[in-house]
């Protein structure tokens, strides 16, 4: 009779252990999923910020190049006009 109770107790303990393990695995899966989601969001934000900064720098470079070209062309045209003006005198 006691042997049957021991077996029953062992089966109950095994069942509770299995359920506790399943719950622990479920909790760990949830934590991992949450960590991965936060990492994904942080990565997307970092990429977005880096892209924005690169675009701003690119815009600045385009503006500087445009100003340089404009100044160079203006100077060349002014110089050429002055030269033509001297020839016409």
Image (spheres, rainbow, N blue to C red):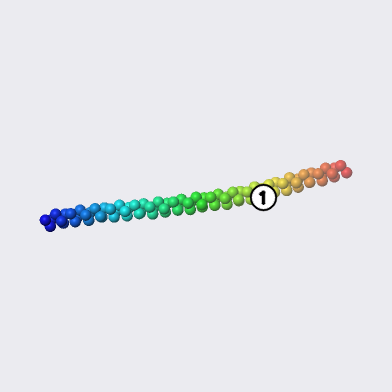
Mark 1 neighbour class, 10 Å CA radius: few under 14, some 14 to 19, many 20 or more: few
> Which residue shows up at 20% across the image and 53% down it?
11
Residue 17 picture location, percent across and down: 25, 55
Q: Observer-nearest residue: 77 or 87?
A: 77
> Which residue shows up at 51% across the image and 52% down it?
46
> Which residue shows up at 38% across the image and 54% down it?
31
Residue 9 picture location, percent across and down: 19, 56
Residue pushed farthest left? 1
> Which residue shows up at 57% across the image and 50% down it?
52
Q: Observer-nearest residue: 5 or 55?
A: 5
Q: Circle 1 is placed at which residue position?
A: 64
Q: Quadrant of residue 83?
A: top right
> Does 12 sit left or right of 1 as displayed?
right
User: Which SS class for mark 1?
Assistant: helix
What quarter of the picture does the N terminus occupy? bottom left
Residue 26 picture location, percent across and down: 34, 52
> Does 4 sit left or right of 69 as displayed?
left
> Does 75 sit left or right of 9 as displayed?
right
What quarter of the picture does the C terminus occupy? top right
Count the marks: how many? 1
Residue 58 picture location, percent across and down: 61, 48
Q: Observer-nearest residue: 21 or 86?
A: 21
């Amino acid at each position: 009779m006691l042997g049957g109770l021991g077996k029953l107790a062992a089966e109950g303990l095994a069942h509770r252990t299995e359920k506790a393990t399943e719950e622990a695995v479920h909790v760990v899966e949830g934590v991992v999923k949450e960590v991965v989601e936060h990492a994904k969001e942080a990565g997307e934000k970092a990429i977005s910020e880096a892209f924005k900064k690169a675009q701003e720098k690119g815009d600045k470079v385009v503006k500087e190049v445009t100003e340089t070209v404009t100044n160079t062309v203006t100077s060349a045209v002014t110089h050429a006009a002055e030269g033509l003006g001297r020839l016409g005198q």
